[in-house]
Amino acid sequence: MSEKIFTMSVAKVYPLYVKKAERKGRSKAEVDEIIMWLTGFDKEQLAREIQNDTDFENFFLKAPQLNPAATSIKGVICGVRVEEIKNPLMQKIRYLDKLVDELAKGKAMDKILRSN
């Protein structure tokens, strides 16, 4: 797997997440909610990390707490099963990709956020 994605800025990918969601009738607020659910960042912290051009490695290092329910994120993203990814950082990045993908596919927020 490419190490290049680890040094990629979250600020460069974030607008793509939002655009993907909005093309499918979803909102920026929902993208933010997903990111905050996964990472434990609050709205201000998330905005600051995006504004600071934080790379993915540091973004996840600074995350207050990965949501314990993240391990229930299953499925294929970019041709790889997220639950089988060995590199912890790459798995977290792909968790985020998978959640945004689920949003864009019209899945209900309670299902995306693994609520009962």
Image: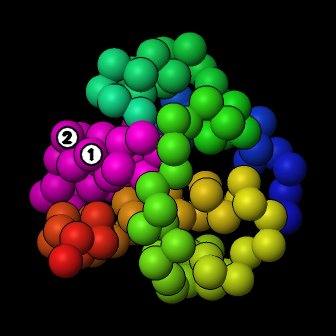
Dot 1: what SS? helix
Q: Residue at x 39, y 46 (%)?
A: 35
Asked whether residue 58 is in view, the answer is yes
On the image, the x and y values in percent for residue 65 come to 51, 44
Q: Is residue 51 left or right of residue 32?
A: right
In reply to whether residue 30 is colored magenta, the answer given is yes
Is there a contact, CB below 8 Å, between mark 1 and mark 2?
A: yes
Residue stretch in magenta: 15-40
On the image, the x and y values in percent for residue 71 come to 53, 73
Q: Is residue 70 left or right of residue 26?
A: right
User: Residue tagged by mark 2?
Assistant: 29
The quadrant in which residue 42 appears is top left
In reply to whether residue 73 is colored magenta, the answer given is no
Q: Residue at x 86, y 50 (%)?
A: 3
Category of crowding for the residue at label 1, using alpha-carbon neighbours closer than 10 angstroms: few (below 14), some (14–19), many (at least 20):
some
Q: Residue at x 17, y 55 (%)?
A: 26
Q: Mark 1 belongs to which amino acid?
A: Glu
Q: How many discs appear?
A: 2
Determine whether 28 is above or below 82 in the image: above
Q: Please state which of residues 16 and 100 is positioned toward the viewer in this rendering.
A: 100
Q: Residue at x 56, y 14 (%)?
A: 52
Q: Mark 2 belongs to which amino acid?
A: Ala
Q: Nearer the viewer, mark 1 or mark 2?
A: 1
Q: Is residue 72 left or right of residue 116?
A: right
The quadrant in which residue 77 appears is bottom right
User: Residue tagged by mark 1?
Assistant: 33
On the image, the x and y values in percent for residue 31 come to 30, 47
The quadrant in which residue 16 appears is top left
Q: Please state which of residues 7 and 67 is positioned toward the viewer in this rendering.
A: 67
